[in-house]
Image (cartoon, helix red, strand yellow):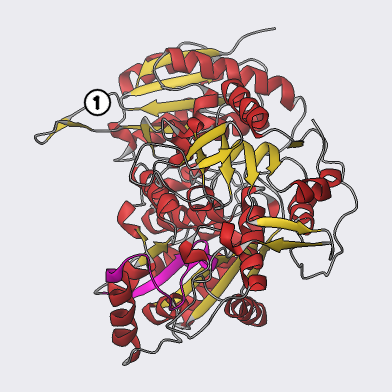
Amino acid sequence: MTSSEIIRLPFDRAELAVWSRSGDKRVSNWPVVYILDDDTQTAVGKKKREQRRKIYVGESLNVAARMRQHLASIERSRLTNLRVIIDDTFNKSVCLHLESYLIELLSGDGAFEVLNRNDGIVDADYYNRAFYQDRFDEIFHQLKMAGVFTRTIPEIINSDLFKLSPFKSLTDDQAFAVEGVVKSLFDDLRSNDRSTTVIQGDPGTGKTVVAIYLLKLLADIRSSTDLDALDDDGDSLFSEFFTDEHRMLLRDLRIGFVIPQQSLRKSVQKVFRKTPGLDPTMVMTAFEVGESEHDFDLLIVDETHRLNQRANQPAATLNAKFRDITTKLFGQDDTSKTQLDWIKARSTHQIFLVDPAQSVKPADIPIELLQQLVADAKAADHHHPLLSQMRVRAGSDYVGHVRRMLGVATESGAQPPASVPDFGDYDFRMFDDVSAMRAEIVHRDREVGLSRLVAGYAWEWKTKGNKPGHDIEIGDFRMRWNSTQTDWTASPGSLGEVGSIHTVQGYDLNYAGVIIGPDLLFDTTTGRIVVDRASYFDKKGKEANKALGRVYSDDDLLWYIQNVYAVLLTRGIRGTYIYVHDPALREHLRPLVSLP
C-alpha cells in the first residue's frame, strides 16, 4: 500500500514555477488536496495578543493553475506556506471528502482562522470510502506532527468548537431547510415583505447547527467576490446564491442571533470569535434585542421555546427591563406580551428554531403560542422540518420512545411502549446502583471523553457559590451540582459533578448518566407517572406567575418535569445510562430500558 505524500513549498511565484517545471504530471493533471497557511504571528497591544494564523484548504485537478489563481487574490496571496497532499490512488471524490474532513477538523481545532466558505462541505459516499478514511487519519497525523493541528482527533470532535462549527456537512433535510430558508429570504428581501420562518425538529436533529450554518452562509454570500468562484466545485447546493444580486441584497443587512440560554450563548460566541464573517456581538439575549438602539433586518432565534413570557425573572433588574422594553415597544406595559413579541417587533424577518416539547419551566413561552407560530409558518409555506437524528446513534425512534416511556403525550397519541425497541449498538441501560452508574461514566470518559452525570432538579443546590458540601445524596453516593453554568461539560471539574438541565440543554455528550430523582414517582394504584412537588427544587420551575395571575397545577408541573428528563435522556451520542430513585418507577421503566 502506498502512503500519501505531503509536499511543502513556500507560496510564491518563483517556487511554484520551479515545481511546475519539475516534470511531475501530478502538478498539472492529478487530483490533489492542498493547504495554504500563514505562519506570521504578531504581538498587538499591551497584552501582546497572538494574531491567529489563517488557513485555507482546497482541492484541484491542476494545482499549479489553481495556485496562480490564489496568488491573484489579495487575501490568499498573503499566505506563505503551501502543502500539497498527493496520493497515487486519489480521485475527485476522495479529494472532496478529504478537503471537507480537514476543514471540519481545522475549524474544531481552533488554532487557525479558516478562510473557506462553508457551502462546499460534502460527505458523499463513494467506492472504498472506509479504506480512504484510514488514509485520512494517517494524513492527519502527519499534519499534526508538522504543527498544522494542535489537538488529537478525539479532543477536537469532543469540543464545543467542533460541535458548533459552521463547517458541517448537512443531512438532506438540513440542506433542504437551508436552501428553502435562503431562497424565501431573498424573495422576501426583493419584495420588501416581512416574513416569519420556522425550522422545527426534535432533540438531536441539528437545529443549532443549521442556525450557525445559515449565518455563515449568509456572511459568505455577502462578502463574496468574483475571485471566490474558484471555491465552487459545482456540486454545492447553494452555489446559485453566490451572485451580485444576492450580495447586494445582504450588503447592509443588520443580523442578530438570539440564544436564550447563557451557557450555549457563551459557547457560540467563542465559535463566532474564531470564524471569519461572524462576530460574537451578533449573539444576543432577547433583552439585548429589546434594549438595542437599532431594529434588525433579520433575527435568527435558537431554542425559541426557551424565550420568556411575562413572569418573575431571576433578578429584580430583569423584571424592570421586561416592563421597560414592553412599554417602549408597545406603548404600555402589556403583560400579555412575550419575548417572542419583542423579536417580531424589532425585526423585519425572523427565523425561529423550535421544539415545543423542550419547554422546561413555566416562564418559557406557552406551548399554545409555539403551536400557533408553527401553524402560521406552515400556512405561509415558511415551515421546514428537521427529521434526521444527528446526535443519538439509536435511530430516529429513540426520541419518541423516551417521551412515551416518560408518559409524555405526543401529537400522534401513541400509546406507551411495552418493551424497548432494537436500538442497535446504542448503549441504553438501567442501573440499580447509582454509584455503579457513576463508575461506568468515569470509565467511558477515560475511553472516549465527554461522558457526564446529569439529573433532574430534585435536590436543593446547597453548594451554590462553591460552598463546601454535597447536594445529591443517595445512600453512600455524594456529589455536587455543577459549579458553573457556562460551558460546564468542558469545565475541568465536570466529571466530578452532576449537571442540571440548565447546563446541558443544546449540548452533546458521548455518554450521559441520567439520575431520575424523587420528583418523579409511579403511582401503582392508578398506573401513572406522577410528580412530587416537594421534591422539585427549581424554584423558577414551579412558582406561580403573579404577573399573569396563573397558578401551575401538579399536572402542569409534571409536563415540564417530563420534558426536562426527555431532554436529559437525549444528550448521549453513544449511550444513555439511567438510575431511577423511586423503586416503583424503576420497576415500571425497567422493561423499557436494556439491562446491564
Residue farthest to the top?
1
Quadrant (top left, top right, bottom left, bottom right) of the C terminus? top right
Q: Residue at x 47, y 61 (%)?
A: 243
Residue 347 image position (x, y, % from top left): 40, 77
Q: Which residues are magenta?
A: 294-317
Q: Residue 301: within the magenta?
A: yes
Residue 221 image position (x, y, % from top left): 44, 57
Residue 448 vertical position relative to residue 219 in the rendered view, above or below: above
Left/right of residue 6 with respect to residue 73 in the rendered view: right
The image quarter in which residue 122 lies: top right
Q: Is residue 187 visible?
A: yes
Left/right of residue 470 with respect to residue 234 in the rendered view: left
Q: Is residue 31 visible?
A: no
Residue farthest to the left?
46
Badge 1 local density, few (<14 within 10 Å), some, or many (20+)? few
Residue farthest to the right?
418
Query: In terms of secondary structure, where does tag 1 sit?
Result: loop
The image quarter in which residue 594 lies: top right
Residue 328 vertical position relative to residue 53 in the rendered view, above or below: below
Q: Quickly name the residue at label 1.
A: 40
Q: Nearer the viewer, residue 356 or 150?
A: 356
Residue 305 image position (x, y, % from top left): 54, 67
Left/right of residue 255 with respect to residue 365 in the rendered view: left
Q: Residue at x 66, y 39 (%)?
A: 573
Total numbered badges shown on the rendered structure: 1
Residue 284 image position (x, y, % from top left): 36, 61
Q: Nearer the viewer, residue 549 or 201?
A: 549
Q: Nearer the viewer, residue 32 or 250?
A: 250
Residue 216 vertical position relative to residue 179 in the rendered view, above or below: above
Amino acid bearing label 1? Thr
Q: Residue at x 76, y 51 (%)?
A: 585
